[in-house]
Amino acid sequence: MSDAHVANLLRVYKSRYEALSLDHRIAHVTIFKNHGADAGASLEHPHSQLIATPVISHQVRERFQQALNHYDEYGECMFCQSLEEEISDRERVVLMTEHFVAMELYASPTPFCTPIYPRRHMASFGDISASEIADLARVLRTVLAKLYHGLGNPDFNFTIRSAPAEYVGVKHFHWYISIIPRLTRMAGFELGSGMFINTVLPEAAAEFLRNVKVELAAGAS
Amino acid sequence: MSDAHVANLLRVYKSRYEALSLDHRIAHVTIFKNHGADAGASLEHPHSQLIATPVISHQVRERFQQALNHYDEYGECMFCQSLEEEISDRERVVLMTEHFVAMELYASPTPFCTPIYPRRHMASFGDISASEIADLARVLRTVLAKLYHGLGNPDFNFTIRSAPAEYVGVKHFHWYISIIPRLTRMAGFELGSGMFINTVLPEAAAEFLRNVKVELAAGAS
């Protein structure tokens, strides 16, 4: 897909996200993509999915609550603060543009988890601007191409983690795209303890991905 | 394996569990088995594993806290109360012996999750008695045989979920064996929302497993 094509997809995401968020029956909208059987994909052709639920899940509430606790304690968005530190440190940064940063998580549960964060504070994906969409299309393509070429087309999931509709505009949460290559399997220890064994240092993963050179023509299809 | 062989394995589990629980550096012991590549097994031959950690994970603490909240509200172990209801209802029970109940979860996140609970209140796996071990060996063999024959040898994990060492003897927690066949894959929706889509009713799964007839000679090997 070209940059323009991916930008169009992101516009469709945004349009559906906004329309469903206005529906009073909907509490939370999850936009995601599954690629490959190990990532739970059941259709062969490339596709994204959206599930709008009348409830906010326990997991989303907890993520929200942790961000709120941080805000209450430090008076600052946890994500904005962490991005500032990561950008200054650079060790875990995979790529950075005017509007976005792709990086490896400081404590990544599995290898090569590579979230993309908007640099501007925004709680909701619905707040993304036209120029940010154009930039994100390029960043998303590049990160997925680095994973594709660097790791041999791994199965992966990405999910847009945004504030639930009722929290649009809060200062403590910051939307992002979580990209998870499915390189390992959750086994008995992870299921039983909730702790994860990751044999790849995030700093090594970031360096590896920085060094994967991808040549993407803006208009390539 | 024969009943006696499985009972010996359980005795080894108990012996290691007890020895490690007495080590003051250890906060929690996770005993588990991975069967098949989809369950994260990396060795071909059948084996169990044990990981002892100097911390209690967030997930284990939260499970514990929920059980404590229930105890504080109702004055009763959540598990004992639920077992009583399930035994009287029978719809989700797969099999029951003098000391153990195997059943489908009321709200099973994935199909055919089949935990085995001791009927007697015990917080810690270390409290299991000799006669309970003999009974559990038979129950574990039977449940795994039902999954094997009924579902075509699915990959699976089992984990012993026991109170952390420092909580031995508490009234609010109840150890059990969590058995999770890996019939589905966690995909973007589950990863993003923490909600699970399960297309098999637990009552239908229980009826199916009750009807899988397995003939296990006590001494078969």
Image (tube, coloured by chain):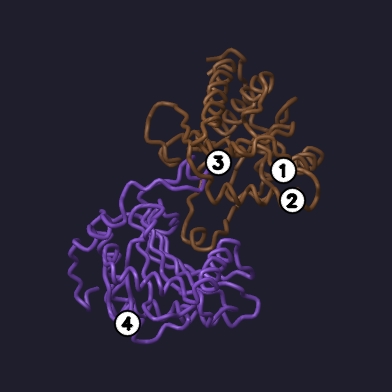
Chain colours: A purple, B brown
Residue A30 image position (x, y, % from top left): 51, 69
Q: Chain of mark 2?
A: B
Horizontal side, residue A94 vs residue B202: left or right: left
Q: Chain of mark 1?
A: B
Question: Looking at the image, which residue is at 41% across and 36% down?
Answer: B41
Q: Amino acid at mark 4?
A: Ala
Q: How many marks?
A: 4
Q: Earlier in the sequence, mark 1 or mark 2?
A: 2
Q: Chain of mark 4?
A: A
* Residue on which disc 2 sits: B70
Q: CA distance from mark 3 to mark 1?
A: 24 Å
Nearest to the eye among marks 3 and 2: give it.
Answer: 2
- On residue B180, which mark appears? 3
* Residue on which disc 4 sits: A134
Q: Quadrant of residue B6?
A: top right
Question: Looking at the image, which residue is at 55% across and 68% down?
Answer: A69
Q: Secondary structure at mark 2?
A: helix
Q: Residues within 10 Å of mark 2 (few under 14, many from 20)?
A: some
Q: CA distance from mark 3 to mark 4?
A: 43 Å
Q: Quadrant of residue A13?
A: bottom left
Q: Amino acid at mark 3?
A: Ile
Q: Secondary structure at mark 1?
A: loop
- Decide which of B18, A101 is in the foreground and name it: B18
* Residue on which disc 1 sits: B172
